[in-house]
Image (tube, rainbow, N blue to C red):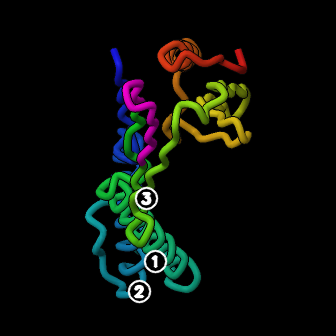
Amino acid sequence: MQTRYDLILGSRRFSNYLWAIISFSGGIGFLLAGISSYLGIQILPFGSTEAIVFIPQGIVMTFYGTVGILLSFFLILNITLNVGGGYNSYDKKTGAIQIFRLGFPGKRRKILLQYKMQEIKSIKLSIAEGLNPKREIYLQTKDQRQIPLTRVGEPLLLSQIEEEAVELANFLNIPLEGL
């Protein structure tokens, strides 16, 4: 096998879909409760808003509702644009490594990093356990740059990340650091 192609999952993860739905639903609920308290009529299809006074509770609920809806639109935009998605391509035949990622719209929406295999020193595995676990694979160049190869967000299982790092180091025929 002369070529390896790893697809990187971006923002199109189940958790982002779930949080977009929860944020939008909660935002609509808070916004309708705030508007109901201002108008003095029951707009919210469930629950009673009669006891909510517009100043200060109604204003705060309207603010939270607006923020929740804006957050859900931001998440939907991320999902639609697949921010963080891309691929890693390793070609032994040409000696080229390409790392491609999608970002937000603008001049630098598409990020393409290209390296020659001779520039690569090792594959580095970084594992940090605790409250915020970090399990990442880096491509370490001879000039000490570290380019992340794994997706951002949900950490992979320890056995899965170790296996992936070993396979990549064996494929590129370079040492593995961090195990």
Residue 157 at x, y percent in the picture = 53, 19
Q: Is residue 97 above or below residue 126?
A: below
Q: Which residues are magenta?
A: 90-100
Residue identified by numbered label 3: 103
Image quadrant for the N terminus? top left
Which comes sooner in the sequence, label 2 or label 1? 2
**Amino acid type indicated by mark 1:** Thr
Nearer the observer, disc 2 or disc 1? Answer: 1
Residue at screen point 43% across, 77% down? 34
Q: Residue at x 39, y 32 (%)?
A: 94
The location of residue 133, given as percent across then percent down, is 66, 31
Identify which residue, 145 or 149, lies in the foreground.
145
Q: Nearer the viewer, mark 3 or mark 2?
A: 3
Quarter of the view holding residue 6: top left
Mark 2 and mark 1 residues within 8 Å of each other at the beta carbon: yes
The kind of residue tagged 3 is Gly
Disc with the residue nearer the chain's start (3 vs 2): 2
Q: Quadrant of the C terminus?
A: top right
Residue 26 in sight here? no
Distance from the alpha carbon under mark 1 to that under mark 3: 32 Å
Q: Which residue is mark 2?
A: 38
Report which quarter residue 105 is drawn in: bottom left
For residue 148, what is the image quadrant? top right
Q: Where 114 falls versus 5 (above or below)? A: below
Q: CA separation, marks 2 and 1?
A: 10 Å
Q: Earlier in the sequence, mark 1 or mark 3?
A: 1
Residue 95 colored in magenta in the image: yes
Q: Nearer the viewer, mark 1 or mark 3?
A: 3
Amino acid type indicated by mark 2: Tyr
Dot 1: what SS? helix
Q: Main secondary structure of the magenta part?
A: strand
